[in-house]
Amino acid sequence: MQDKTLKTSAASAENKNPIITTRGLVKKFNGKTVLRGIDADIYEGEKVAVIGPSGSGKSTFLRCLNLLEIPTAGTIAFGDEIIYESDYYAQKDKLKELEAKKRVYTSGSDDEQVEKLTEKLETLKNDKKESERLTKELKNHLKLLKATSYRDGAQAEAEETAAKISAAKAETAALTVEIKKAKADIKARKAEVRSSLDASVTASLQAEIDKQRKITAQSRARHKKFIAQMEKTIDSHRRTTGMVFQHFNLFNNLSVLDNITLAPIKTGLEAVKERKKLLKAAARKGDENAKAELLSLPHKLEIIENARKQAYELLDRVGLKDKAGVYPVTLSGGQKQRIAIVRALAMNPKIMLFDEPTSALDPEMVGEVLQVIKKLADDGMTMVIVTHEMGFAREVATRVLFIDEGLIKEDAPPKELFGDPKNERLKEFLSKVL
Ligand SMILES: Nc1ncnc2c1ncn2[C@@H]1O[C@H](COP(=O)(O)OP(=O)(O)OP(=O)(O)O)[C@@H](O)[C@H]1O
Ligand SMILES: [Mg+2]
């Protein structure tokens, strides 16, 4: 593992702590690179709006932040704690590069003469293909002529075509010979290059490869270990980030209240169970304090009551206290999204991540949801919000990130980013959406 403390970017306010930091965040899906090395710091209290074209990686970025997606490479830290770190894929790429370099050197394919000969070979191959194509075309034409042989002049044309076919065939044959010769020439030249290779260069390339192989193997071992560890801690990390999706993702078979209290109750009970185990062990050893504490642990009913109480308070805050007992199907989109927000808040997250929370809503419901988010922002909640609502971003965000092709291309306060965009792609994007 590398340096535990990550350097913060120039944008850092000195008295503030980053809640989430990413460095060189890369995400690939089946070999397709979607995030290409994102460096971001989200500071306490910030409201960061993320904008950018469709498919640019905004959702993937957000999902990586709470580990709904496991990144391919890079670092993610929550506060000072590094929760994901890997350079395995980068090291692997480096190894591949070195191996390719050596291959090129020892095969002689970067020799100038070999390059010229290879180019010539390509031209000959193309010529041959063209000649074959012509032969085929002429043959088809001849077939057609034969089928219409009763027409005037068809006989003469057929003879002429047959002659053309012979010529084209001869051309193809000649090209085949030339291609064979070109291939032999390349082989000979490569052999010549190989015999004059500088052994010390080959050896040093091999040494570099050997070294990189070791580094890659070590990095792979670390990567695997990290992934294995992460599986144990991932839930607790996710709990510190509240995520709200475009499509609410409420449980339709649970009442609003149960939707909200499900996770806090589960977490609360797990925590008590865990603590009980520890205290019991201590009590067995005759620890009187542990015994007393064991007795004072909250019991199941208390945990449930507390979760419910908090749920009602939160529902009240979004104006939906009277909806606690109903099922999500009876709610409007705007109400569902407000419940989804409450559900995320019920875990007391340090940061809220919103992925286009209003884009699935009918226009008349957008306002009520944005209002709730704005209120949260005003109350000091740190948030990252992917949004197409440029007006909202301008009004509420303290900083806007423009993501394009998997990279942050611009990072500025809204006034600056919207008023004086620097990046060409951003200018183009804004001209379409504003
Ligand atoms: N699970 C996945 N498997 C394969 N490809 C994926 C996966 N998730 C996302 N992608 C691809 O990654 C790219 C970025 O997707 P992402 O959803 O992050 O874009 P976005 O910026 O949020 O777009 P939008 O504005 O349309 O929501 C897309 O090409 C998408 O097809
Ligand atoms: Mg998206």
Image (spheres, helix red, strand yellow):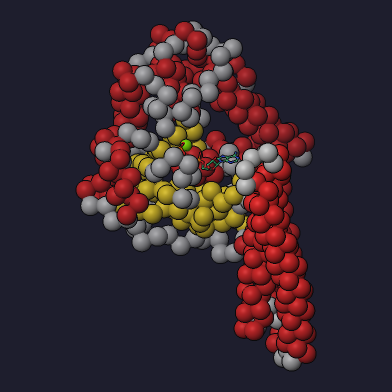
Query: Quadrant location of residue 159?
Result: bottom right
Point out the image quarter for the N terminus: bottom right
Give above or below for 259 relative to 2: above
At 60% from the left and 29% from the top, the residue drawn is: 267
Q: Residue 146: where, in percent of width, then height?
A: 71, 43
Percent position (x, y) of residue 354?
Answer: 43, 34
Residue located 72% across and 33% down the image = 277
Q: From the top left corner, tell me how far across and down residue 302 is, in percent.
A: 57, 19
Q: Nearer the viewer, residue 201 or 145?
A: 145
Q: Quadrant of the C terminus?
A: top left
Query: Residue 213 occupies which quadrant of the picture?
Result: bottom right
Left or right placement of residue 71 versus residue 376 in this view = right
Report the residue at 40% width, 38% height from top: 385
The answer to whether residue 430 is above or below residue 411 is above
65 or 133, nearer to the observer = 133
Q: Nearer the viewer, residue 381 or 124?
A: 124
* Residue 180 x/y as whole percent: 77, 74
Q: Is residue 82 visible?
A: no
Residue in the image at 26% along x and 35% along y: 391
Relative placement, left or right, of 69 versus 429 is right
